[in-house]
Image: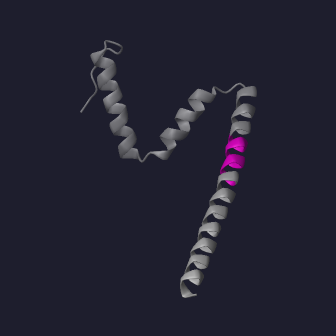
Amino acid sequence: MAQADAHGVARDQLRAFVERIERLEEEKKTVGDDIKDVYGEAKSSGFDTKILKKLIAIRKMDENERMEEDLILDTYLHAMGMIDSPPED
């Protein structure tokens, strides 16, 4: 009988995890829809949503990470002949 109780507890615990995940997935979908709506509002106000997404990604970076990425981008742009001066060290 203890075996049956253990299976019942595991089943209940599994069900609880699944239900929590399902609720969170629904919340994630709702938040995603809200974000999409805000981008739509920004676009209708004349903002470039592609650039807004880049801006948000940049704001998530710390300063050193952003500076390193900018330096690498400038190096690549210079190597491709797309900018005149090489990046400064």
Of all residues, the one furthest to the top in this rendering is 81
Residue drawn at x 62%, y 59% is: 21
Q: Which residues are magenta?
A: 27-35
Image quarter (top left, top right, bottom left or bottom right) of the C terminus: top left
Query: Looking at the picture, does residue 31 appear above or below residue 8?
Result: above
Query: Looking at the picture, does residue 83 appear above or below residue 75?
Result: above
Residue drawn at x 65%, y 50% is: 28
Q: Place residue 5 in its image quadrant.
A: bottom right
Q: Position of residue 34 (x, y in %)?
A: 72, 43
Residue drawn at x 26%, y 29% is: 88
Nearer to us in this view, 42 or 7: 7
The number of discs equals: 0
Name the chief secondary structure element in magenta: helix
Of all residues, the one furthest to the left in this rendering is 89
Q: Position of residue 12 (x, y in %)?
A: 63, 73
The colour scheme of the drawn protein is one colour
Nearer to us in this view, 32 or 11: 11
Query: Looking at the picture, does residue 18 appear above or below residue 7?
Result: above
Q: Is residue 6 magenta?
A: no
* Image position of 7 (left or right of 68): right
* Image position of 17 (left or right of 69): right
Query: Looking at the picture, does residue 48 appear above or below residue 39?
Result: above
Q: Position of residue 37 (x, y in %)?
A: 74, 37
